[in-house]
Image (tube, helix red, strand yellow):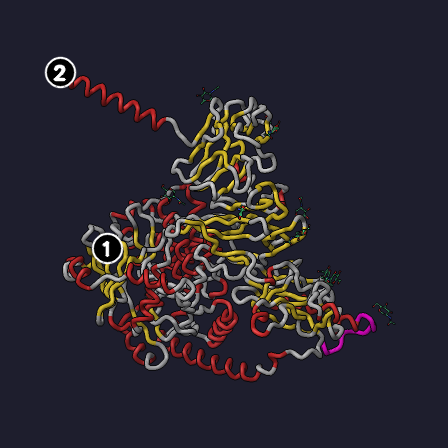
Amino acid sequence: MGFSSHANLFFVLFMLCFYVLDVGIATDTITSSQSIKDPETLSSKDGNFTLGFFTPPNSTNHYVGIWWKSQSIVVWVANRDQPLNDSSGIVTFSEDGNLVVMNGQNQVIWSTSVSNTSSNTSAQLSDVGKLELTETTTGKSLWDSFQQPSDTFLPEMKISSNKTGSGVKLTSWKNPSNPSVGSFSVGVVERVKIVEAFIWNETRPYWRSGPWSSGVFTGVEQMNSAYLNSFSVLDGVLYYNLDGLSEFLIYVLNSQGQFEEKRWDDEEKEIQVSWTSKQSDCDAYGVCGSFAICDAHSQGTNGSPICSCLKGFEPRSKEEWDAQNWTSGCFWSTPLQCERAKEQNTSIDTNEDKFLELQMVKVPDFSEWSNADPDTCRSQCLENCSCVAYSHDDGIGCMSWTENLLDIQQLSDRGLPLYVRVAYSTELEHEEGKKTTIIIIVTVIIGIMITVTCACVMWRRNSCHPAKIWYSIKSAMKRGKKDFIRFNVEPLEQTGHKVFEELKELLLFDFERLATATNNFHESNKLGQGGFGPVYKGKLQDGQEIAVKRLSRASGQGLEEFMNEVVVISKLQHRNLVRLLGCCTEGDEKMLLYEYMPNKSLDVFIFDPTKHKVLDWGKRCSIIEGIARGLLYLHRDSRLKIIHRDLKASNILLDEKLNPKISDFGMARIFGGTEDHANTNRIVGTYGYMSPEYAMQGLVSEKSDVFSFGVLLLEIVTGRRNSSFYDDERSLTLLGFVWTQWNQGNILSLIDSEIYDPNDHEDILRLIHIGLLCVQELALERPTMATVISMLNSDVAFLPPPSQPAFVRVQNVLNSESSKESQRVCSVNIISITDIHGR
Ligand SMILES: *[C@@H]1O[C@H](CO)[C@@H](O)[C@H](O)[C@H]1NC(C)=O
Ligand SMILES: *[C@@H]1O[C@H](CO)[C@@H](O)[C@H](O)[C@H]1NC(C)=O
Ligand SMILES: *[C@@H]1O[C@H](CO)[C@@H](O)[C@H](O)[C@H]1NC(C)=O
Ligand SMILES: *[C@@H]1O[C@H](CO)[C@@H](O)[C@H](O)[C@H]1NC(C)=O
Ligand SMILES: *[C@@H]1O[C@H](CO)[C@@H](O)[C@H](O)[C@H]1NC(C)=O
Ligand SMILES: *[C@@H]1O[C@H](CO)[C@@H](O)[C@H](O)[C@H]1NC(C)=O
Ligand SMILES: *[C@@H]1O[C@H](CO)[C@@H](O)[C@H](O)[C@H]1NC(C)=O
Ligand SMILES: *[C@@H]1O[C@H](CO)[C@@H](O)[C@H](O)[C@H]1NC(C)=O
Ligand SMILES: *[C@@H]1O[C@H](CO)[C@@H](O)[C@H](O)[C@H]1NC(C)=O
Ligand SMILES: *[C@@H]1O[C@H](CO)[C@@H](O)[C@H](O)[C@H]1NC(C)=O
């Protein structure tokens, strides 16, 4: 007995040692004394990436590379131009500490070529697929494979312009059997403030993305994946971050010069191309020559050519043009007034040149940039004879062109407006339509005025001067074209009927099951009462905890529409959104199933005198950033742009690690939010979080969410509720209170003293500053969520000074008695308010 138990103990100790040793040797690292011989490999910690020797299909050569899951998905190659002709290759360290590949004759055929290394180095293959050479003693990174990419853009990589002389580009393979450097490369070019991506064939431009603006390349079409917001551009560097999505999604420049988005299809178990830079013949750089526009959609209908001269222009060479050789382009049919004036040495007469307006185009190459506002941009261009076109965009500023306009393309989504100088006598089509437009505008203005006036009466706002009303109408109209949300329920036809059917299966729960899970919707299981119905906690048979939202019956939607919405919304997946698991529709009942969040909502923490300490400064910062990212995802997902409309502390749920998750994000859609109007008849939301233009005019846009975000941010930083009043004498709202204290430089009084640390002072100031920018009265002045995130990351060095926020003083509207009265006065046919309180 004694002996046997000793033996057992030894065995346990032995196993323990073995275990410890096994863990101690990291398989993702090689040190200077180790090497990898063909066909040995090195794997990343999670096993997703492998470094080793591979042979491309239809080739006998051996290469050292990194691949994902299988050798058919090679993401990086070391010895691209020096293949090994047999399997005698070895990856090891040279004496000076560089990582090298040697052939059977001990010749170095590839090296990391770092000049100062210490001799004690090691190389690690990380979980993102990056091979990194570090100095073992100091841990200093000497080199990594992301600085020397091949043809693949992996998450966490960046492509940079050559501004500082260290541009990083991707280069294509020669062909699928030969990874040596091919003739195509993709990179970014930064001209003053304008950043564009290019594909070059050798040195000639082959494809152009159009300028980057607020989160997208404006000339890129059909890039409708949910992952569009994984790109960001700063200081001429294009970053790629999948940001919480665990999908495998890469961008590859293939040997034909097309940049392809490839994703791993887990069902088909293969990699599939989900987007490519070549959508049509129009994507060939400058195919139509100068002053011509390429429209791929004109081709299909009646076989007409893709290229046409702009209005007021004619081909330089009629014969060539008719033979579909467009390279020489077009020229003005009537000389410009500007030039005639110059020739005749007379002063410019009253018949000035004018501008041809194009909408949704990829603007031409070679623009100049200035910081002018739209009106100045136009007049600057009109006054300068060498200016042939201009365009203004809030995210970029004023662009102008002085040369030939090359590479203009008509797009069906995104794009920018373009104004091209033409002679006064040129007839422009849309002038006929002007009259009706004017009538429509007048009608709209009168409508808005009535609405606003009524809203003013209702809220008894002292500040409702006619001038102010006019101003907000003007800004709303200016904004109209851009910020307008087009609730474009793109049916699931694209993804195919099959998928829809599958999803339907997956999502549908029967009523019985949910009744059992929630103990017959028992009161004790009730988590809260949301604006759209009560929420219950439930437990499925497999033990999974869920939250069930039982929608009130007034959604006014048909079953099919409802299902469409649910399926589309269930496809939105982001780390900072509460996951929709499914739904239930039986008879009158409509229910939504969400993942259950054990930590309840944000308001439970920040406003609680005992719990608020749990959220220290760092945690609050990361919560703010998480909310911003979730919101950006909702705004930028081009397949389905969602305006939340009811962002508030109680709609931010916290998971077990206190990560924020936005909830209720599809509700605006499900509850008849599909009007194709900026004015929505049904105002859902919560007083105090609603932006002025939304509360007063029912105008919804991304910027109304930005306003709510700003309020939320200030609540999180200050730990004070927006609905309380501050400073009795002046009865200030939270916004008013923050604004006055900010102007007095009195930041300390704003911060939750328990969490204040002098080291964070600068960060706190910055956050409050960003919050104030978000709650500015004019929607136009508020930043977009993309800009907010850049600001939060301190990528934007200079923040503009905020102007006075909306709702500085407590209005009568907060007095529920009088608000209800006036609501009745006004709600008959203009606005109806659904007053919703947090659950
Ligand atoms: C390899 O060669 C075969 C036969 O020539 C061809 O069918 C196949 O497409 C080639 N594969 C690649 C990747 O080039
Ligand atoms: C492989 O290449 C080496 C030189 O790099 C050469 O000496 C050797 O003969 C080649 N072997 C074959 C089988 O071609
Ligand atoms: C190389 O070493 C020199 C002197 O130690 C140092 O000044 C220089 O910055 C180093 N270069 C790199 C790339 O580390
Ligand atoms: C390299 O550095 C590691 C960690 O500092 C150390 O354990 C090892 O002995 C060093 N090797 C040599 C050859 O100096
Ligand atoms: C940067 O790239 C542009 C366009 O490819 C090229 O004309 C220029 O010479 C490059 N500049 C440097 C410093 O490499
Ligand atoms: C790339 O340029 C070469 C000439 O340098 C040309 O022969 C080839 O056709 C071009 N490729 C494409 C796809 O245009
Ligand atoms: C990497 O591997 C882990 C575990 O093996 C897996 O959960 C994760 O999804 C993988 N990542 C990708 C991008 O496939
Ligand atoms: C198109 O016209 C240009 C001259 O403008 C000429 O150089 C070129 O060869 C022509 N291309 C074709 C395919 O005819
Ligand atoms: C033309 O304009 C120039 C400069 O504005 C002036 O010096 C010159 O006298 C003018 N010539 C005629 C013929 O008016
Ligand atoms: C007109 O524009 C060109 C190019 O932008 C610029 O060089 C020139 O100074 C401008 N002229 C005037 C009078 O502004």
Name which residue lies at 32% across and 81% down: 828
Dividing the picture into quadrants, the one containing residue 291 is bottom right
Element at label 2: helix
Tell whether position 348 is magenta.
yes
Which-is-in-front pick, marks 2 and 1? Answer: 2
Residue 418 rendering spot, x and y as whole percentages: 61, 67
Earlier sequence position, callout 2 versus callout 1: 2
Indicate whether 217 appears above or below 9.
below
Q: Mark 2 points at which residue?
A: 2
Name which residue lies at 41% across and 53% down: 629
Indicate whether 211 appears above or below 560.
above
- Residue 449 is left or right of residue 724, and the answer is right
**Which of the two residues, 161 or 599, is positioned nearer the viewer here?**
161
Tell whether position 343 is magenta.
yes
Majority secondary structure in the magenta region: loop
**Which of the two residues, 189 or 832, is positioned nearer the viewer here?**
189
Pointers 2 and 1 in contact (CB under 8 A)?
no
Residue 333 rendering spot, x and y as whole percentages: 74, 74
Residue 687 rendering spot, x and y as whole percentages: 33, 66
Looking at numbered disc 1 in the image, what kind of residue is underneath it? Answer: Ile
Cα distance in 3D space between marks 2 and 1? 53 Å
Indicate whether 686 appears above or below 271.
below
Indicate whether 344 appears above or below 191.
below
Q: Single out the residue that lies furthest toward the top.
A: 3
Circle 2 Cα neighbour tier, 10 Å, few/some/many (<14 / 14–19 / ≥20): few
Q: Name the residue under label 1.
A: 546
Q: What stretch is highlighted in magenta?
A: 342-352
Residue 832 rendering spot, x and y as whole percentages: 33, 76
Is residue 127 something that shows in the picture?
Answer: yes
Element at label 1: strand
Looking at numbered disc 2 in the image, what kind of residue is underneath it? Answer: Gly
- Residue 424 is left or right of residue 644, and the answer is right
